[in-house]
Image (tube, rainbow, N blue to C red):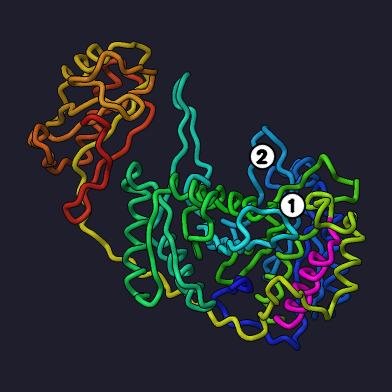
Amino acid sequence: MRNSPAVAPEKKIQQSQTTKIVIAEGDGIGPEIMKAVLRILKAAKANIETESIEIGEQVYLSGNSAGIDEKAWEAISKNSVILKAPITTPQGKGYKSLNVTLRKSLGLFANVRPVSALHPYVKTHFPNMDIVVIRENEEDLYAGIEHKQTDDVVQCLKLITRPGCEKIVRYAFEYAKAYNRKKVTCMVKDNIMKLTDGLFHTVFKEIAAKYPEIESNSQIIDIGSAKLATVPEEYDVIVTSNLYGDIISDIVAETAGSVGMAGSANIGGKVAMFEAIHGSAPDIAGLKIANPSGLLNAAILMLAHIGQTEVADTIKNAWLTTLEDGIHTADIFQGNISKKKVGTEAFADAVIERLGKTPKNLPVSTLAKGTGKIEIPNYKRKEATKQLVGVDVFIDWKGEDPEMIGGGLMRVKSHNLKLKMITNRGVKVFPEGLKETYCTDHWRCRFVSNSSTIETKEPQYMAVEYEQVIALLSKLYQNGYDVIKTENLYEFDGQRGFSLGQGE
């Protein structure tokens, strides 16, 4: 089925009702493609009223490091629907991605990217692919929490939460149910990241069991990505975390023929944002040759979201007919298929001329037949018994011999805590490490209770008091160790809540 839009969890607006939407023209080619898309929406008689805001590069360069001002936030909050062209985030100088800020600040937890082949009008080796990538939008490494800790080492925190996992996985299955999709595939890397990706996978299996009518399976992200690029026909709906979803959605779009053709929806409980998935392409800005299809497809998703499915069908069918007629922009032009190479405005004119027509070879858009309703239940926390059992102390030490730092720490006596092991970049180097292991200046030193049994295959950790941790840190400071970070080690309902070191 190639006509699956993204629909928010709330009730849709009636088609006869005028909907006010926020327009962000963006940077680079953004103003050009937005102008073309709005002309098409107007010609198709979309029942919308627009309010423009300025966000992106010029706001950054004016001194606002967020890239968005208070008036823009107010407009978004008031209208709840945004159609956004690509924006440019200046490199360096502490600028944070506005795309990430919008998604996280507005609670846009689901990024939905439908991609299907448009063979032969858009060149692809996979004419039957039809995939929807549903990507968690708020968490993971995109939290952007990074620290430089030593001369040699920086870190980035990967944050995965159970409520975040439950929302996105539930959305994926509800989406499949609403649009007659047959299979949902989860992509993770829990063979390595057993806690973070492990949680995502666990939640997936829990929720999949509640939808027995929908086939479900899981794949490791690396082989899954490879298969997406070679046998995409095997996939239907894919649900994954933020970074993986960002990567594979571009793989899927490019495999279908062009990243420039795909639109996406960012869905939250109150606000929804629609955008092309490509960048601002400053190298061709002003040349009037950009393909507006990605933003147009985003606008079609937006119309379906606000209940104007008949208009959405009219525009999409006109767009498909334009492609069938060989009216193509330079990025998809093929000498043996295309009939006429056009720029941005001429392509929009061609779509407008074909409003009311339907394609003969590509699947006809039938959004108006009904899209169903997606509802996400409120999260219910289940509290576990939490017990402190140790602490990982990260030390900046410029030596190279693990035996030297290990021996020194073994001699530090502090309130019933003992050194269990030391790792360097996640690999155990003390005790009994390999001399070939390269060590940098970042040492994770695990301390546990003297009563813990640590020599067995499954270590048994005994409870410690937080005051013991404070006393240990004081002792380390007195002995000249540069403590740069600590992570408390907890068990939850008796289950270990921390990873073991490689080789431990």
In this rendering, position of residue 30 left or right of residue 471? right
Residue 236 position, x and y percent, is 50, 65
**For mark 2, what is the residue?**
95
Give the magenta part as a residue range. Answer: 309-328
- Of circles 2 and 1, the one toward us is 1
Most common secondary structure along the magenta stretch: helix
The residue positioned 32% from the left and 48% from the top of the image is 195
Amino acid of disc 1? Pro
Toward the viewer: 313 or 331? Answer: 331
**Between discs 2 and 1, the one toward the N terminus:** 1
The residue positioned 77% from the left and 60% from the top of the image is 293
Residue 482 position, x and y percent, is 36, 20
Toward the viewer: 243 or 146? Answer: 243
Compared to 190, does 33 lie above or below? Answer: below
The residue positioned 72% from the left and 72% from the top of the image is 361
Amino acid of disc 2? Tyr
Label 2 residue SS? loop
**For mark 1, what is the residue?**
86
